[in-house]
Image (spheres, rainbow, N blue to C red):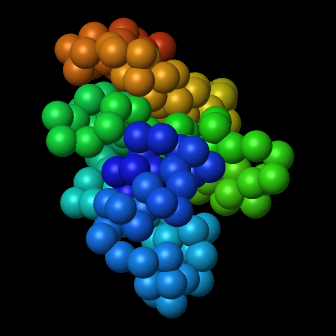
Amino acid sequence: MLLFWEHGYEATTLNDLTDALGVTPSSIYTAFGDKKGLFYSAVNRYLSGPVTSERIIQEAATAHDAAYGLLKAAAVGFTGTLTPRGCLLASSAISCSPMAKDVQERLASLRKGIEIRLRERVEFDIQNGTLQSDTDSQALAAHTMALIQGMSTLARDGATRDHLLRLVNTAMQCWPRGRLPT
């Protein structure tokens, strides 16, 4: 997972993987089918940590809190001391050639899934009166995802955790705070 995170899908070679894992290429093929199967397994592991986007959104009291939680988790996760900087889903997709279009599409689908869940949370807040009826749920969710992807690039460029957390706080000022249900 760390190799793919650091170098991207295509730049990580089978030799890199066998050296890091201490196995033969045939072991990778037996266990995962091919490099792509191993990559998808690494992505699943990346997405199944203790703090998942799905959990952040589900457990948030409001859509505002969900967006803040996603952005804060990204700032912390993208600047970890034991992991590569940035986002595996973003870094791996950016470096793909047209020959790996299926990989790009799968990663895009995962990112879109997060955006859809956040948009649905915003829509829930609109329906229950926490957010005003004219709130643009699609724009708010897309805004948050764009910030996350931008933060990934900033982290890869060397931005500190503090820098990203300040960005999160500034970005959240754009979010409607809503009103308490009557």
* Front-most of residues 178 and 100: 100
* Front-most of residues 57 and 109: 109
- Look at 32% across and 60% down and name the residue there: 20
User: Quadrant of residue 77 in the image?
Assistant: top left
Q: Position of residue 67 (x, y in %)?
A: 41, 35
Residue 39 visible? The answer is yes
Q: Is residue 167 left or right of residue 136?
A: left
Q: Position of residue 148 (x, y in %)?
A: 47, 30
Q: Is residue 153 left or right of residue 3?
A: right
**Which residue, as the protein is rendered here, is positioned at the far bottom?**
30
Q: Is residue 61 left or right of residue 89?
A: left
- Look at 41% across and 67% down and name the residue there: 18
Residue 68 visible? The answer is no
Q: Position of residue 174 (x, y in %)?
A: 47, 14
User: Quadrant of residue 156 in the image?
Assistant: top left
Q: Position of residue 27 (x, y in %)?
A: 44, 84
* Front-most of residues 13 and 50: 13
- Look at 32% across and 68% down and name the residue there: 21
- Look at 25% across and 15% down and name the residue there: 160
Figure check: 59 above or below 84:
below
**In the rendered picture of this protein, how many numbered marks are placed on residues?**
0
Figure check: 177 above or below 117:
above
Figure check: 154 above or below 26:
above
Quarter placement of the N terminus: bottom left
**Which residue, as the protein is rendered here, is positioned at the far right?**
98
Figure check: 103 above or below 108:
below
Quarter placement of the C terminus: top left
